[in-house]
Image: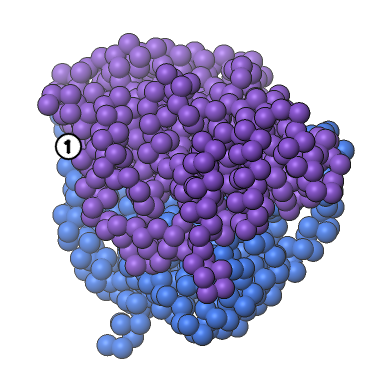
Chain colours: A blue, B purple
Amino acid sequence: MSETHFLDGFLNPKSVAFYGANNKGSSLAAIQIMNLIKSNYDGNIYPIHLKLDSVMGYKAYKSIAELPEIPELVVIVLSAKLVPQIFEECGEKGVRRIIVISGGFRELIGSRKNTLTKELNAISNKYNMRFIGPNCLGVFNNWYGTNQENLAFNTSIWEHIKKGNFSIASQSGTLSSHIWFDPESVDLGLSKSISVGNEANIDLVDCIEYFKDDKDTSVIGLYVEELKRGKKFMELASEITKKKPIIAIYVGGSEAGNRALKSHTGSLAGNAKIFDAIFKETGIIQTDYVQEFLDIALILSRGIFPKGNRLGIITNSGGPGAMAANNAEKKGLIVPELSESLQTQLMEILPLNASARNPVDCAFDMNLPYFYITLPEILMKSGEIDMIIQYGVVGFQDVLDDYLKYEKIAKHADFHHQPAEVMDSLAQKLLQPTMKNSEKYSIPILYVNPMSFTSPWSKRLRKNGALLFKLWDRPVNALAKVCEYVDYKNRSKKT
Amino acid sequence: MSETHFLDGFLNPKSVAFYGANNKGSSLAAIQIMNLIKSNYDGNIYPIHLKLDSVMGYKAYKSIAELPEIPELVVIVLSAKLVPQIFEECGEKGVRRIIVISGGFRELIGSRKNTLTKELNAISNKYNMRFIGPNCLGVFNNWYGTNQENLAFNTSIWEHIKKGNFSIASQSGTLSSHIWFDPESVDLGLSKSISVGNEANIDLVDCIEYFKDDKDTSVIGLYVEELKRGKKFMELASEITKKKPIIAIYVGGSEAGNRALKSHTGSLAGNAKIFDAIFKETGIIQTDYVQEFLDIALILSRGIFPKGNRLGIITNSGGPGAMAANNAEKKGLIVPELSESLQTQLMEILPLNASARNPVDCAFDMNLPYFYITLPEILMKSGEIDMIIQYGVVGFQDVLDDYLKYEKIAKHADFHHQPAEVMDSLAQKLLQPTMKNSEKYSIPILYVNPMSFTSPWSKRLRKNGALLFKLWDRPVNALAKVCEYVDYKNRSKKT
C-alpha cells in the first residue's frame, strides 16, 4: 500500500545523483555518499561536479544532462541561489524526486525578500516534481532492498542502526539523524527516517500519510515545530493512533523556544496549549525529552501495550523498589497492594525479612531461578497486575570476575571464572521461561540492571530479549505514557 | 574539624574485624573484604570464623577475644539473632565502632515483638559503642590514607570510583553503593558514602553533621525515607546549605511508596507535602530521579554556581537549540534575547543563515576555533548571560575515521586519519582558552556531544575539563535546580 505513495520513491531509489559532492570530509554531499557506501547501497551513484572526474570512486558528470539514465532521486548540497537553475535542469532531464539539503532559503537577499522557495515550487510544479527540504539532512530506509543486515538506503545517519519498526519524520535534522550514536547501547531499531527541513513542498502530513500504511512502520516518531496543515494532520493522526502509536516532541510555546524556531525553520510556532490539545485529542504521546522519546519508542516497538495501568515491582533491594513505586504513582500508574492470598503464596518462597505487598522485595535473597522465573510467573498469573518492572538483575558473575583479577582473591576464593558458554546457557535458562510467560499471560516485563548497559550480563539479558534499563526512573516514566496511550486507544474504540 | 567527629573513625579505621566472612562469592562479608583488597586497603583485616583458618588469605580467628589488638571497626554479617551476643563480645574486647550489615531486626519472631534493636542499643550504651545499621551496606571513604589513586577504605562499592568532593548518606544501600557502575562514563567523583540502614543508633543527622565540617566534602547527597530527628535535621541543614549544597531524593507520600518503605526500613514516611516544605525551607535541592541527583551533584562538585539564571545557548543545529531553550524556560531559566549590539557583533563572524538572537545557531558553519573559543568568549564577556550550554561539540574526526575503515572511501578521500597526538593537541587548543575564559568571567559552560560519552573526542573534551552530556535535556534540568539553590543561598545571605 505504502509502495504506491509518492514518498516511497524517495526511500527506495535505484539511482541517485549528487550535486555538490567532492572528496573532502567537510563536504556534506560527500558525507551523504559515504553513508551510502557504509550502508552497502547497491544502486547507481552519480556525483555531479564541474571539475572533478570522480568522487569517492564514482565517475563524476559535469551536468545532469550527461547522465546515462534519469536518476530516481537527486540530492542537492549547493548554495541556495544555484538551486532554482538545478531544478530546471532536473526537470528537463525528467527527474521526479529531489532532496534539497542546502539551507539559506529564508533570509533576506540584501534588502530584498527571498523568493527562492517560491521559485522552487513553481519549477517543481511545472515539471511534476516533488522535493524534500530545503534545509534538511536527507532520508534513511533500513528496509531498502533485501533484509540483509547493514544494507540500507542511508544518506543521513553516521552509524549502523539495527533494523526495526520505528519510523521518524522530523523538522530537525538532528532528531532524525544524530540521536543514533553508540548503537551498542541502543536496543531500539529504526525503520525509516525523513528529515523534512523547511517543508517547502513535502511536510510532516505527507510523512505520516506514508507511514500509516507502511508495513515496516509500527511506531511513528515526530519532531514538530509547526504544522502547516493542522486540520489534515489531526484527521490523519486520529486515524493512525487507533492502529499505530505516534510519539511527538513539540517545541514551542516559550518565548525563547519560538525565537529559536523563527531562526531555525522560519516557523511561527503556535501556542503550546493549542498543541497540547491537538496531541491529546488525537492520542499522540507527547514528551519534551529525546531520551524519553526513545524509551517510549523502544517499549512500543516491542509491541508492549499493557492491558491496564497496574504495575508490579520485583526488587532485591528496598530503595529502588520504593523509588520506582513512588514515582509510578506520581505519574498515574497504580502499584496495587497484592491480595492476601497472593502475598501468602509469595511468602512461601520468600525469606522472612522479605515483603510480598508490592513492591515484592526479596531482600537480596538471590536464588536465581526463583528471582528470574518464579516470582515474575506468580505475578503474571495472578491477574492482579498488568506489567512488571524488575530491579536487580545484576551480573554477579561479572562482579566476581572482576574480583578474580586480584591475585590475593584469585588464590583464596572458593568461586571461579565461568566460561562464556556456561553464562550464555544460564542467561537463557533464567530468561526464556519468563519471556514465554510474558507472552502467554500478556504481561510485559521491564528489567533494570544498574551495571553498564554493555556489561557481559546486560548483553546476555538483552540477547535473550530482555527490555533492559540502567536505572528505574526511565522505564517508569515511559510506561506511564504508554499506558496513557493504551487508555486513549481503548476509549476511542468504544466511541 | 571533622576528624574529631565520632563518625570519622568509621571511615578511617586502621584495623577491621569481619564476622561472617568466608571465601564464597555469595558471602556478603567476603564481598566487603574483597572490596577492601580491590581498594588497596593497608590496615589490618581480621576475619572471625568458627571453622576456617583463613579467609581471602587473612588469618581467621575463632573469636574476637583472640585478636592481637582491639579492631578499630567491627563489621557483622551474621544472622540477626546472633548479633546481640557478638555486641557483648565486642564490648568486652573494647571495640568502639560496629557496622551491622545483617537485616532481620524488624519482623516478628514467631508471634513475639522483635526486641533485637533495643537490645543492641542497650549493649552499645553499656560499653560506650556506636553502630551503623542494621540492614545497611557499609561505608566508603575515597580519602582514606594518602591521596594515592585507587586507595580507599571501601567495604561497599564494587568499582573504582574517582576521588571527588561529593559525599552521600543514604537510607538505601543501593543509592550509597550501586549507582557507581561504569566508571568510564561517570565524571562525578566520590568522597565518602555511608549506608545508614535502619538507623538504630546512627542516623542521617549524624552524617550531615560530620559532612558539614569535612574538608573532603563540598556537596552532600541524601536518600531519605524518614527523618528520626526532624528538628535537628532542619537546624543543621539550614546551616549547611549556606555553605555546602545538599541534594536529596525523598521517597514517600504515595501509597505504594509508603508501603515499600514500611517493608524496607520499617519507617512510616511522612506526608510528602511536609517534606517538600522542609526541603524548601532549608534550601535542600530535591529530585525524584537518581540520574538527576548525579547530574546536579556533578555540576555542583565542579564549583558551578551561576550568578543568575540567564542561559546562553550555542548550537550548530536548530532543533537541539530550540528544544533546550523551550525546556529551559519551562524549568524557570531565562533564555534572554541578546541585545542588538551583541547580535551585530556575533553576526560579523556568523554566516548569513545563522541566528545570533539566543540560541546562537551557527547553522553548521563549523569553523572550529570560532565555534569552540570565539562564540563562547563573546557571550561570556557580554554580561548578558550567566551560563552557557553548547550543543554540537561533535567528534568529526571520529566520524571521518569511521568512514576511512571502508576501502572505497579510504582510496579516494581527500582526508586522512589524524594521529592521537594531533587530536590531543587540537582538543587542548580548542578547549583550554574557553576553560580559562569560563573562570575569568565566572560563566560556567556545559557541553553536549550526541556521540558516545566514551568516544575518542568525548574523552578528549572530558580530559580537558569539559562538563559533558550526551543530550541537552539533562544539563538543562540540572542547571535549573542548581540555579534555584543559588537563588536560595543569595536570599538567605541577605536575611
* Quadrant in which the N terminus of chain B is drawn: top left
Image point (57%, 14%), residue name:
B425
Number of numbered discs overlaid on the protein picture: 1
Residue B210 visible in this rendered orientation of the protein: yes
Q: Which residue lies furthest to the bottom in this view?
A: A494
* Quadrant in which the C terminus of chain B is drawn: top left
Tag 1 residue: A113
Q: Which of A26 and A429 is in front in this view?
A: A429
Q: Position of residue B420 (x, y in %)?
A: 65, 20
Image point (84%, 46%), residue name:
B52
Residue A217 visible in this rendered orientation of the protein: no
On screen, residue A243 above or below B325: below
Q: Position of residue B296 (x, y in %)?
A: 38, 36
Image point (70%, 65%), residue name:
A367
Mark 1 closeness class: few <14, some 14–19, many ≥20 residues within 10 Å: few
On screen, residue A112 above or below A468: above
Image point (47%, 64%), residue name:
B263
Image quadrant of residue B346? Answer: top left
Q: Where is residue B486 in the image (x, y as percent from the top left)?
A: 25, 29
Q: Mark 1 lies on which chain?
A: A
Q: What type is the residue that disc 1 sits on? A: Lys
Q: Where is residue A197 in the image (x, y as percent from the top left)?
A: 35, 48
